[in-house]
Image: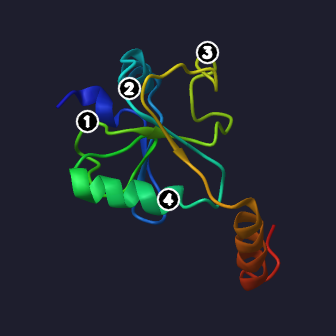
Amino acid sequence: MPDEAVVLATPCDNRSTTVTDPRILRRFLADLDSPVLVSFPRTGSHWLRMTMELYFERPSLVRVFYYPDRTNYLTLHTHDLPGVLPEDIGADIERSNVIYLYRDPVDTVTGAIVTRTWLGGVA
């Protein structure tokens, strides 16, 4: 296992780990056959990534849920938040393998409203 895999891995409060090392992300994205998960927030991507990680026993980027010590990443998923992907990569990623997760927009918005109401109006 390469030492660089843990250089910029940050434990999260929910026992997951965020991998933000630009070398790891660039290496993963250099292989055009490496799949990328594309989704809108609140579509179930968190659940899908956790299920895939358990089934394939391989972590996903950028958040690793169950296998933080492994470096054979299965897929990459991000909402293109600032500071997650290196600036020279951004959202302009060409792939041959893309998983597009879609959810009815009405359900997505309704789910977001219910969650915010349940959390006490937190934005």
Give how far apart the Cα atoms at labels 4 and 1 are. Answer: 19 Å
Q: Are marks 4 and 1 in contact (CB under 8 Å)?
A: no
Please name the amino acid that badge 1 sits on: Thr
Closer to the chain start, of discs 2 and 1, is 2
> Where does residue 58 sit, x and y in percent of width and height?
25, 46
- In the picture of the structure, the residue carrying the numbered disc 1 is 71
Residue nearest the observer in this picture, 114 or 33: 33
- In the picture of the structure, the residue carrying the numbered disc 2 is 24
Closer to the chain start, of discs 1 and 3, is 1
Residue nearest the observer in this picture, 86 or 74: 74
- The residue at 64%/61% (across/down) is 42
**Label 1: how many Cα within 10 Å (few below 14, some 14–19, many 20+):** some
Please name the amino acid that badge 2 sits on: Ile
Residue 46, numbered circle: 4
- In the picture of the structure, the residue carrying the numbered disc 3 is 88
Q: Residue 65's image quarter?
A: bottom left
Give how far apart the Cα atoms at labels 4 and 3 are. Answer: 25 Å
Closer to the chain start, of discs 4 and 3, is 4
Give how far apart the Cα atoms at labels 1 and 3 are. Answer: 22 Å
> Where does residue 57 sit, x and y in percent of width and height?
21, 51
Name the mark nearer the viewer: 4 or 1: 4
* Quarter occupied by the C terminus: bottom right
Q: Are marks 1 and 3 in contact (CB under 8 Å)?
A: no
> Where does residue 119 sit, x and y in percent of width and height?
72, 80
**Label 3: how many Cα within 10 Å (few below 14, some 14–19, many 20+):** few
State the scheme by which the image is colored.
rainbow
Please name the amino acid that badge 3 sits on: Asp
Q: Is residue 115 left or right of residue 70?
A: right
Q: Is residue 115 left or right of residue 58?
A: right
* Quarter occupied by the N terminus: top left
